Amino acid sequence: MNWLRPLAAGGCRVTFGGQHLTPSWARRAFAAHPQNQVAEGVVKLQQPKAQLGTDEGKKNFILKPPKGTRDYSPKQMAIRERVFNTIISCFKRHGAEVIDTPVFELKDFDIAGHFDPMIPDAECLKIVHEILSVLQLGDFLIKVNDRRILNGVFAVCGIPDSLFHSTCSTVDKLNKATWEDVKNEMVGEKGLSPEAADRIGEYVRLHGGLGLIEQLDQDPKLSQNKLAREGLGDMKLLFEYLTLFGIADKISFDLSLARGLDYYTGVIYEAVVLQPLNAHREEPVSMGSVAGGGRYDKLVGMFDPKGRKVPCVGVSIGIERLFSIMEQEVEASKEKIRTTETQVLVATPQKNFLDVKLKLISELWDSGIKAEMLYKKNPKLLNQLQYCEDTGIPLTAIIGEQELKDGVVKLRVVASREEVNIPREKLAEEIRRRLES
Amino acid sequence: MNWLRPLAAGGCRVTFGGQHLTPSWARRAFAAHPQNQVAEGVVKLQQPKAQLGTDEGKKNFILKPPKGTRDYSPKQMAIRERVFNTIISCFKRHGAEVIDTPVFELKDFDIAGHFDPMIPDAECLKIVHEILSVLQLGDFLIKVNDRRILNGVFAVCGIPDSLFHSTCSTVDKLNKATWEDVKNEMVGEKGLSPEAADRIGEYVRLHGGLGLIEQLDQDPKLSQNKLAREGLGDMKLLFEYLTLFGIADKISFDLSLARGLDYYTGVIYEAVVLQPLNAHREEPVSMGSVAGGGRYDKLVGMFDPKGRKVPCVGVSIGIERLFSIMEQEVEASKEKIRTTETQVLVATPQKNFLDVKLKLISELWDSGIKAEMLYKKNPKLLNQLQYCEDTGIPLTAIIGEQELKDGVVKLRVVASREEVNIPREKLAEEIRRRLES
């Protein structure tokens, strides 16, 4: 499932190059964007990239929708979602658990169109921050850098353009390897001079916040480079916005972050979940990247027959990685994971009360309550209560002869075993109230 | 996404053949069950079916998980869902629309295990009723029949077992063709005698409710047949439960319903959405099946090495069919479908107020409000208000110098243009209150 943030620009809703392009076109271009490694589009993208200089490569290239998807407009998708949600809520109301689902490696959020600098970029980082905060996976860090700053650094260190890409991929290893190892690879394998490597090393080992940005802005060599100056200006703006969002303390401007720089034209970022400190380590250790993205202003324009530029910024969430970290956490915490969302079990101490139970559970379902009963005509009350304990159902609604006569239902809190009589017509409301508070 | 209703049977939670089988085994068996026509398992299922009589076919058959799925336990699926929901809520909070999603033809809900007759079967029909009621697609009808009743009918009409299957598929055409056409096919193509066809015709043209069940129960020929008597007994029980659920008026006991009888061992059902009456028609016309299922008590046991029986009942929802009916309805009603769920646009009439807007929108996001702003430093107020009108955002939160000084935000209802000042710290609560009521 990919998500697109439709752009608001001065009253005009979607502004791919100032014009409203068909959503299907937009979807296809996005399916092929660099972060979506699942989409087949990515594979097809390799070809035109090689032909970027030629007009033919640009114009004759046809993007196919990724396998398993069809051409749906955002409106159709909204209708589909409404149908899906109705069905899923109904299944949950009836106590079902999910048994399989297709695997998506990544979930993407993209903002496309013209806008003032760094506002959507800051929102992408806010989104990553919100997701990692809500999931409570422990401490995390979002590293940011800018392609233009890296370009500037390489230029002022005297690295020829031809070595830029291979040097980059070596720099990217700094989060796992020592500087010595990285330098050895630069000199031994990539063909840099030891002096050039040392000059790069002075920069790429730096990380920090607003202070570092200002320090580099004053750097006598770097401030001579136009690209680096642009990148540093935007980075400063980004940190101002992140400070207003209250999340700057989790963001690290890190000059070793390179990612797959081919696509990116500006800011890049990568979020890592950190392992807690322990006796053997001085610094928290990264458990690997869980989200990443950046600005890719040239990619979508490549597929536009008129060559219109569509600035884009986006982020991909590494759903499988997040899932496995979450699973480890749950395993470690011994938290009991419920596989259904059932709120109440409808039970009875009486024999031959199936019809009463069926009527009551039907009322609850129709009020939107997630309710179950045992599929037995005459189960023992003890078995019904035990089932709640075993599966984690928090409430039991007990109805016997006396309750039926009095027009009430006995609501039992499974954890505390507390019981209280509730007027039958208020039962759904009371269940909702108790579980919400 | 397939859903399984884990079974509660006398305190034992999942009872595949009385034993708790591994969820992965259960998942695989279900992926292959007859209603799930998407799963590759179905294709593979064709082979062992042919070998049902032999032990080899039963024991050596290996079910593979369908493409795009992995072996997840219900617990893992629950964790995955938690991660997915966090990410999706975050994307929605930031005004994104879905641009693609994989296509699932069907969604399944299954109940597996031992239980008292017809209780889970009735719940499956309640589920179909709930989904079709909530979706408001107009009138609908759920046809039910029972494989055993059909078997009985065919037997008392003197149809040899060898002609059972082919006669069935002809009977199934009665919802589209006239009895004359169906009879011609039976006699001309399927080799039945005209008399036998007429005898069948007396039965399969019947449809009704409890009255019809009682009438057939008294039928001198049919009441001689053991299978038919069993089926009619269960059908009566089913209608009693459906009456308690308050949905019997939408259920039609229809003797022409056959479905793919190969898999089914008892009750079968199929839901159809009805086209409204018009001048040209005397009876509402079916727009085709939108859900269907039944009892398949022998399927899962086929894959159990020990041959344990696992009674199963399930229903598949025809998601693509529902989607296209829904789309037609929306088209006809001119309803404006929103593609995002944004609740409020954060706006300002002031220049250079970007920092104020960023701080306010960040507070709203953190309170769970779905909020957007224009990605411009200084958009015109008129453009901001126009954007709400164009996209259907119901509220605008306006903050200018006066509001900032007074610690309030001006909340504007887009439809009525009514404006009211709200204390800033109560804004999220007020937005939620207004949109819920």
Image (cartoon, coloured by chain):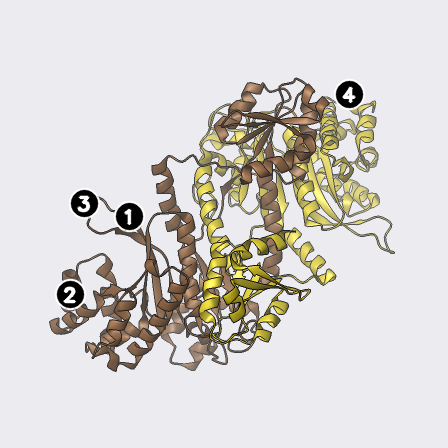
Chain colours: A yellow, B brown
In the image, what residue occupies the spot 30% across and 81% down? B226
Cα distance, mark 2 to mark 4? Answer: 91 Å
| Rendered image: mark on residue A224 | 4
Q: Mark 2 points at which residue?
A: B183
Which three-letter amino acid code belongs to the residue tagged 2?
Lys
Which three-letter amino acid code belongs to the residue tagged 3?
His
Q: Are marks 1 and 2 on the same chain?
A: yes
In the depicted view, which residue is nearer to us: B41 or B199? B199
Task: For label 1, count other residues whose C-alpha is less than 10 Å away and answer few (under 14), some (14-19) or many (20+).
Answer: some
Is A103 placed left or right of B282 in the picture? Answer: right
Q: Mark 1 or mark 3, which is nearer the start of the sequence?
A: 1
Whether residue B290 is visible, yes or no, is yes
**x, y percent for residue A15:** 51, 26
Q: Is mark 2 on a helix, strand or loop?
A: helix
Cα distance, mark 1 to mark 4? Answer: 73 Å
Is B245 placed left or right of A275 in the picture? Answer: left
In the depicted view, which residue is nearer to us: B374 or B115? B115
Q: Name the residue under label 3.
A: B280
Q: Do labels 3 and 1 share a chain?
A: yes
Cα distance, mark 4 to mark 3? Answer: 82 Å
Which mark is nearer the camera, 2 or 4? 2
**x, y percent for residue B50:** 36, 74
Cα distance, mark 3 to mark 2? Answer: 26 Å
Q: Mark 1 points at which residue?
A: B275
Which three-letter amino acid code belongs to the residue tagged 4?
Gln
Q: Mark 2 or mark 1, which is nearer the start of the sequence?
A: 2
Which three-letter amino acid code belongs to the residue tagged 1?
Gln
Is A161 placed left or right of B165 in the picture? Answer: right
